[in-house]
C-alpha cells in the first residue's frame, strides 16, 4: 500500500484505511462508465450519481487491503441508504488522496521500497 495515496477515516464501526490503487481505479472506471478525471470533476461539481459514492468507498477499502466481502458488508451497512451528505465527504477524501496525495514526504526508505516493488513487478511481467 502506498502511504502517499492512502487516507484513514471512520466508517461505521471504526477507523479504516482507504486507497484507490491503479487496479481499483480501473474497476471504478468500469463500474461508473467514467474515466477517473471525469469522475473527479463530477464529484467536485456535484454532478455524480448516488451509486458512485459507495463504489468509491468500497474500492478504497479493498485497495487498502480489506477483504472484498468485508468491504461489501461495511458498505451495505454504513454507506447505502444513508444521507448523501454523510457519505459524500468520505468518498471525496478517498478520491482526493489519490488525486493530490496526502502530503506525506517520502523517506529514502520509502523510495527504495517502492523502487524495489516496481522492479519486482516489472521483472514478473517480463518473465510472464
Image (cartoon, rainbow, N blue to C red):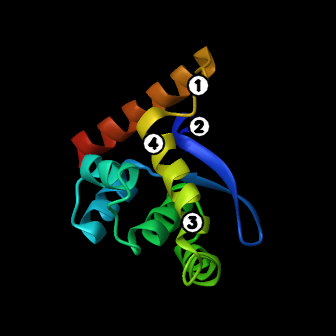
Residues 120 and 83: in front is: 83
Residue 29 lies, in percent from the top left, at: 27, 61
Q: Position of residue 95 (x, y in %)?
A: 46, 49
Of the two numbered discs 2 and 4 in the rendering, the one whose residue sits closer to the viewer: 4
The residue depicted at 51 percent of the width and 41 percent of the height is 97
Q: Is residue 83 above or below residue 19?
A: below
- Specify the label residue 98 is tagged with: 4
The residues bearing labels 3 and 1 have C-alpha atoms spaced at a distance of 36 Å
Image quadrant in which you'd find residue 79? bottom right
Q: Earlier in the sequence, mark 2 or mark 4?
A: 2
**Residue 83, above or below 105:** below
Could you classify mark 4 by the number of other residues whose Cα lies within 10 Å: few (under 14), some (14-19), or many (20 or more)? many
Which circle, 3 or 1, is nearer the viewer? Answer: 3
| Tag 3 near tag 1, CB within 8 Å | no
Please tell me the numbered disc located at residue 85: 3
Which of discs 1 and 4 lies nearer the camera? The answer is 4
Q: CA distance from mark 4 to mark 3?
A: 21 Å
Disc 1 + disc 4, Cβ < 8 Å: no
Answer with mark 2 or mark 1, whichever residue precedes in sequence.
2
- In this rendering, the answer to whether 81 lies above or below 59 is below
- The residue that mark 2 highlights is 3
- Residue labelled with disc 1: 110
Nearer to us: label 2 or label 3: 3
Mark-to-mark CA distance, 2 and 3: 27 Å
For label 1, the SS is helix
Disc 2 to disc 4, C-alpha distance:
10 Å
Question: Residue drawn at (58%, 54%), measured in percent from left and top?
Answer: 18
Q: Which mark is residue 92?
A: none
Quick check: 123 above or below 32? above
Q: Are marks 4 and 3 in contact (CB under 8 Å)?
A: no
Say which label, 2 or 3, has the lower sequence index. 2
Q: Secondary structure at mark 4?
A: helix
Amino acid at each position: 500500500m502506498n502511504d502517499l495515496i492512502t487516507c484513514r477515516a471512520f466508517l461505521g464501526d471504526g477507523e479504516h484505511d482507504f486507497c484507490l490503487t491503479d487496479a481499483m481505479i480501473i474497476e471504478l472506471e468500469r463500474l461508473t462508465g467514467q474515466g477517473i478525471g471525469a469522475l473527479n470533476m463530477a464529484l467536485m461539481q456535484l454532478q455524480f450519481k448516488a451509486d458512485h459514492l459507495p463504489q468509491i468507498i468500497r474500492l478504497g477499502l479493498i485497495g487498502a487491503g480489506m477483504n472484498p466481502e468485508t468491504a461489501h458488508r461495511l458498505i451495505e451497512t454504513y454507506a447505502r441508504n444513508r444521507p448523501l451528505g454523510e457519505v459524500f465527504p468520505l468518498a471525496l477524501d478517498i478520491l482526493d488522496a489519490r488525486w493530490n496525495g496526502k502530503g506525506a514526504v517520502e523517506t529514502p526508505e520509502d523510495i527504495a521500497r517502492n523502487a524495489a516493488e516496481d522492479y519486482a513487478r516489472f521483472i514478473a511481467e517480463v518473465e510472464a
